[in-house]
């Protein structure tokens, strides 16, 4: 369905036949399509896959062969797969984080999702998976008011065309009893070709670059990106991991309906439900723009330094300037081909005198910055790359300057195959780790709750207070099936 | 001052295991609910960490393990523990089997109905000293950790308004803060006892060198004995004849297709830091070996002379040389057999997924920024494995106590371990691992697979089902997915766990120590002061 004329990503694409089986969202943020909408769906219980059959016939899910207009992606929560009629055995073959969901009480704690960082009365939505492995009498999470079974992500060139597309989707879904329980309008918020987020910063600069036998690198790009290379198995189930072994995913018993799915040589009697699929982490994060800049102003005032205004503090909170340039001890790093620098390590800024140790950029991906000695740097960079995610998030809500009172934020979307090692690890061991990089008693200054933020300095470090301005509205772990797996789910009755 | 790292291991009556679990959980919930939590244990001033775990295994009766990390001496600690939670412990031991041997009498005395006798002697007698005992913030007593943490908080308070310090030099900042804090913190007036006393330091090296020497000498014995009774040339012929098949076996072992299907992908795996300076190290090793052989010859000559041996120094040299040749053959033989075993060892690709157990373990994790982990694995059979496991563990344990970086708490650049212990239990049939660390389990295990995998592989390569290993240390734990699944499967929930300093990471303890150290000096040079101030 793609026009095939353009590479979907900057430096890599998938080899055949995977490119025709993988959802396009994996290889592309669909940057050629400015408008988007996330339709969060609730399926009728035990309604089977008829709705999906009807949907796929009219609105095909985009594959990874090339650009296409419009584009669409579809992902399921665990309860969504259950509602679609997937059998018990297949349902239990998914990974534990996906089965339990983001709201599971212990996962909640690990992710730092508590009242300090959740919207009032929230979270509002999740898959509401039962705490599948809880012993009788164990404390379990309160269900969210809204249960989400699937996320249909639609992208088009402009708002009007998108409206037509979403209306069409609605019309298809309605007769099948599929309810749209939440709609999140998505935009890239492009300024000079660079996507920005609501606080004003260029975002989505750094992405991992997969390698392996299933990846084709664009001529001129290295086989393995020296700074951002990750095995294809980190973003796609069934693809080779760092040891060259296929990453295990869910299976389904072999039966006529499952004939659309490939075999898995390691599991005779089963079909591979996971191959070319992956897990998608969705988090609707509300941003309070006024609170952010107020907090930055207050911190700047506390510093009492004429040249250190709120933009100066905000750049340290993020680790990059508003235009995306990473901070370093003598200003910002030089641009790479006109773009914000990304092929860098922290050898020159080991103490965080330029880019603070606890800045959002360093916490979200420490690169080689946690190495205690220069000799450790290479190993620590490789270790950090074990926890990368492909980010596909988009912004929602109008610009603060246009409509200050409206709700706005980021629909965080991350693609990974090992939720515990990748997304949860970043969140728990880096972002919300109070001891991160030898710091004490502080968390991510952007995502974390109100608390101190350290600005390393000479002779003395300074600690400023930062407020809470990003809150979780809702979210969960989704399964982003391959196109054959979607075809299989559509056949379930 | 080396801190005590021990565990008390007792078998449980199968019918009593549920009751035991309930008692432990009750102790946890009742202590955790208090404010501040765990007051009874907090009051034991020498205690760092304490955990209670029950390991169940289809092939054994359950075992009850109390892990304790505390400041010496041991006697008063056990008495304090008895005073703090003796009543509860006594109830727990009533669910356990009477240990065999003389300690059984003590067990009877503390568990009979209405027993009043102190638990301390029984606990001390039953305490198991692990083969590997590792401490992160080496030599830091609980009292010192707490004093310096309080000092850190006061320093932070003093710096809350940094403006008065803006115009000052680091040395002036140091002196101002010192003057401000000295009245409250008397500990700054006196030097604390050394973290690594001279005798302990020497002892660590003596143990490590002693073990290496013992191994080398044992390896020399066959060749030397042969040379003693057979003339040199025939002896050499015998050794070479024995060596040839061993060398061929080893060569085959090296060349055999690796069970890892994607050798190429290994190019992207973390490189270990051991690779750097290999040539230099090799030359040093050869030099040391030559000197060693000369010393061996000298010893043979001297000892032989006193035993009325008629050989001259040259003859002694020949015996030493044949000993070396024999040792090389023996090592080749051991490696060849090891490779053979390693290629045939079954690896457990997918340990029975017990999601309920994982959830139970997870429910007790990540309550604070430190965590606890306890695991128990079966040991692979055979004499060679038994010997290699013990030699490997002893070597690793001694190495980690002597190596400068490990002494500073770093293992391959990772500094998150407060305490760790590895001990064979069930007569060496199983290997137990207990540890207290900073951060999440996921983080700890990732450090294991990404950074510390050589040591971790050496510890567990003798465990049944461990990922495929080469030469005891290669691959193994670096196979992250296999290793993590295997490890998670071997774990038991930490039913009771106490940390005396819940908010302090090893890094923070060291940072506090550096700051305190600086404040103890009345004056710092400007360079030292600059470095010191970076920690503030």
Image (cartoon, coloured by chain):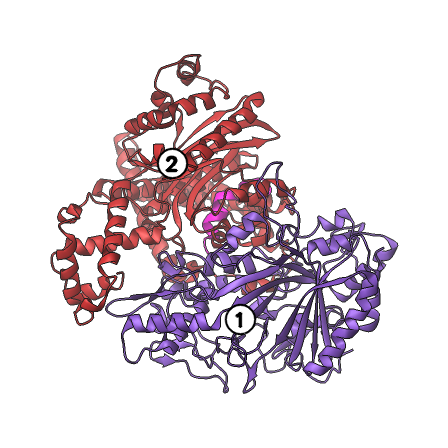
Chain colours: A purple, B red
> Dot 1 falls on which chain?
A
Question: From where the camera sits, is residue B242 visible?
Answer: no
> Dot 2 falls on which chain?
B
Q: Quadrant of the N terminus of chain B?
A: top left
Position of residue A66 measured from the top left corner of the image (x, y, whole percent):
72, 79
Q: Is residue A303 magenta?
A: no
Residue at image point 31% right, 25% down: B79
Q: Which residue is mark 2?
A: B38
Q: Is residue B139 left or right of residue B61?
A: left
Residue at image point 63% right, 57% down: A126
Query: Could you say which is closer to the camera, residue A381 or residue B442?
Result: B442
Question: From where the camera sits, is residue A139 visible?
Answer: yes
Position of residue B460 measured from the top left corner of the image (x, y, whole percent):
51, 43
Residue at image point 18% right, 67% down: B164
Report how far apart the C-alphas of labels 1 and 2 lie in the structure: 45 Å
Which residue range is magenta in the image?
A: B450-465
Q: Nearer the viewer, mark 1 or mark 2?
A: 2
**Would you place residue B46 above or below residue A472 in this image?**
above
List the single residue furthest toward the right.
Answer: A256
The residue carrying pointer 2 sits among few (fewer than 14), some (14 to 19) or many (20 or more) residues within 10 Å by Cα, namely many
Q: Is residue B461 magenta?
A: yes
Position of residue B456 measured from the top left corner of the image (x, y, whole percent):
48, 48
Badge 1 marks a residue whose secondary structure is loop
**Would you place residue A389 above or below residue B249 in this image?**
below
Q: Which residue is mark 1?
A: A228
Badge 2 marks a residue whose secondary structure is loop
């Amino acid at each position: 369905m793609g026009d095939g004329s353009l590479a979907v990503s900057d430096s890599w694409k998938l080899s055949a036949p995977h490119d025709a089986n993988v959802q396009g969202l994996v290889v592309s943020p669909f940057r050629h399509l400015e408008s988007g909408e996330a339709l969060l769906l609730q399926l009728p219980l035990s309604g089977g896959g008829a709705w999906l059959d009807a949907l796929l016939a009219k609105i095909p899910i985009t594959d990874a062969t090339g650009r296409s207009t419009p584009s669409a992606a579809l992902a399921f929560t665990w309860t969504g797969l259950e509602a679609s009629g997937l059998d018990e055995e297949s349902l239990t073959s998914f990974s534990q984080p996906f089965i339990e969901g983001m709201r599971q009480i212990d996962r909640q704690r690990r992710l730092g999702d508590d009242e300090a960082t959740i919207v009032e009365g929230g979270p509002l939505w999740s898959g509401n998976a039962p705490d599948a492995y809880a012993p009788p009498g164990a404390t379990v999470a309160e269900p969210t008011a809204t249960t989400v079974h699937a996320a249909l992500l639609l992208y088009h060139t402009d708002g009007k065309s998108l409206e037509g597309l979403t209306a069409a989707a609605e019309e298809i879904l309605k007769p099948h009893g599929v309810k749209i329980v939440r709609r999140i309008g998505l935009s890239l918020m492009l300024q000079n070709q660079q996507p920005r987020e609501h606080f004003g910063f260029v975002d989505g600069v750094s992405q991992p670059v997969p390698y392996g036998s299933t990846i084709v690198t664009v001529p001129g790009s290295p086989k393995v990106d020296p700074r951002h290379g990750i095995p294809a198995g980190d973003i796609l189930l069934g693809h080779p991991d760092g040891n060259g072994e296929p990453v295990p995913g869910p299976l389904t018993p072999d039966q006529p309906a499952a004939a659309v799915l490939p075999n898995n040589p390691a599991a005779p009697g089963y079909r591979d439900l996971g191959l070319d699929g992956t897990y998608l982490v969705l988090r609707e994060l509300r941003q309070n723009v006024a609170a952010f800049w107020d907090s930055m102003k207050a911190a700047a005032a506390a510093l009492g330094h004429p040249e250190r205004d709120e933009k100066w503090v905000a750049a340290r909170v993020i680790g990059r300037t508003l235009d995306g340039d990473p901070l370093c001890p003598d200003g910002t790093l030089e641009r790479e081909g006109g773009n914000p620098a990304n092929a860098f390590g922290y050898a020159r800024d080991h103490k965080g005198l330029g880019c603070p140790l606890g800045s959002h950029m360093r916490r979200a991906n420490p690169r080689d910055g946690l190495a205690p000695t220069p000799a450790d740097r290479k190993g620590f960079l490789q270790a950090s790359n074990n926890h990368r995610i492909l980010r596909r998030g988009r912004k929602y809500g109008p610009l603060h300057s246009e409509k200050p009172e409206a709700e706005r934020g980021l629909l965080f979307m991350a693609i990974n195959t090992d939720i515990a090692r990748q997304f949860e690890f970043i969140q728990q061991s880096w972002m919300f780790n109070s001891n991160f990089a030898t710091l004490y008693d502080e968390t991510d200054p952007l995502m974390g709750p109100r608390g101190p933020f350290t600005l390393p300095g000479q002779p003395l470090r300074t600690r400023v207070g930062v407020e809470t301005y990003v809150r979780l509205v809702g979210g969960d772990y989704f399964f982003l099936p391959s196109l054959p797996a979607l075809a299989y789910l559509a056949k379930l009755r | 001052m080396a801190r005590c790292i021990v565990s008390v291991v007792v078998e449980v009556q199968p019918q009593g295991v549920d009751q035991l679990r309930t008692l432990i959980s009750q102790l946890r919930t009742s202590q955790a609910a208090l404010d501040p939590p765990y007051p009874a244990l907090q009051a034991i001033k020498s205690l760092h960490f304490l955990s209670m775990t029950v390991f169940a295994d289809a092939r054994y009766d359950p075992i009850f393990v109390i892990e304790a990390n505390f400041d010496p001496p041991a006697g008063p600690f056990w008495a304090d523990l008895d005073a703090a939670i003796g009543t509860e412990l006594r109830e727990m031991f009533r669910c356990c089997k009477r240990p065999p041997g003389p300690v059984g009498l003590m067990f009877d005395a503390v568990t009979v109905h209405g027993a009043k006798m102190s638990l301390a002697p029984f606990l001390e007698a039953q305490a198991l000293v692990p083969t590997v005992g590792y401490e992160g913030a080496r030599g830091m007593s609980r009292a010192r950790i707490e004093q310096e943490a309080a000092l850190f908080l006061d320093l932070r308070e003093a710096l809350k308004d940094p403006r008065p310090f803006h115009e000052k030099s680091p040395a002036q900042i140091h002196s101002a803060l010192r003057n401000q804090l000295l009245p409250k913190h008397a500990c700054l007036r006196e030097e604390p006892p050394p973290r690594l006393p001279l005798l302990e330091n020497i002892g660590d090296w003596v143990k490590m060198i002693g073990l290496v020497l013992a191994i080398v000498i044992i390896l020399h014995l066959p060749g030397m004995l042969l040379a003693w009774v057979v003339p040199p040339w025939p002896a050499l012929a015998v050794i070479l004849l024995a060596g040839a098949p061993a060398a061929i076996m080893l060569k085959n072992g090296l060349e055999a297709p690796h069970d890892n299907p994607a050798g190429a992908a290994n190019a992207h795996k973390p490189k270990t830091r051991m690779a750097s300076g290999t040539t230099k190290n090799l030359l040093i090793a050869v030099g040391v070996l030559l000197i060693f052989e000369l010393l061996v010859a000298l010893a043979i000559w001297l000892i032989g002379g006193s035993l009325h041996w008629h050989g001259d120094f040259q003859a002694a040299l020949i015996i030493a040389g044949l000993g070396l040749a024999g040792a090389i053959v023996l090592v080749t033989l051991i490696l060849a057999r090891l490779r053979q075993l390693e290629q045939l060892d079954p690896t457990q690709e997918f340990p029975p997924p017990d999601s309920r157990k994982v959830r139970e373990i997870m429910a007790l994790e990540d309550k604070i920024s430190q965590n606890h982990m306890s695991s128990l694995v079966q040991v692979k059979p055979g004499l060679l494995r038994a010997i290699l496991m013990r030699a490997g563990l002893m070597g690793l344990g001694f190495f980690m106590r002597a190596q400068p970086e490990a002494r500073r708490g770093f293992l391959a650049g990772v500094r998150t371990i407060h305490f760790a212990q590895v001990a064979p239990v069930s007569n060496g049939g199983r290997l137990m691992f207990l540890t207290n660390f900073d951060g999440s389990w996921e983080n700890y295990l990732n450090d294991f697979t990404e950074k510390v995998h050589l040591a971790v592989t050496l510890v567990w390569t003798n465990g049944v089902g461990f990922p495929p290993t080469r030469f005891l240390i290669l691959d193994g734990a670096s196979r992250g997915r296999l290793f993590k699944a295997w490890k998670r499967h071997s774990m038991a929930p930490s039913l009771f766990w106490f940390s005396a300093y819940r908010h302090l990471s090893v890094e923070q303890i060291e940072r506090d120590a550096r700051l305190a150290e600086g404040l103890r000096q009345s004056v710092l040079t400007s360079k030292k002061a600059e470095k010191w101030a970076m920690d503030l």
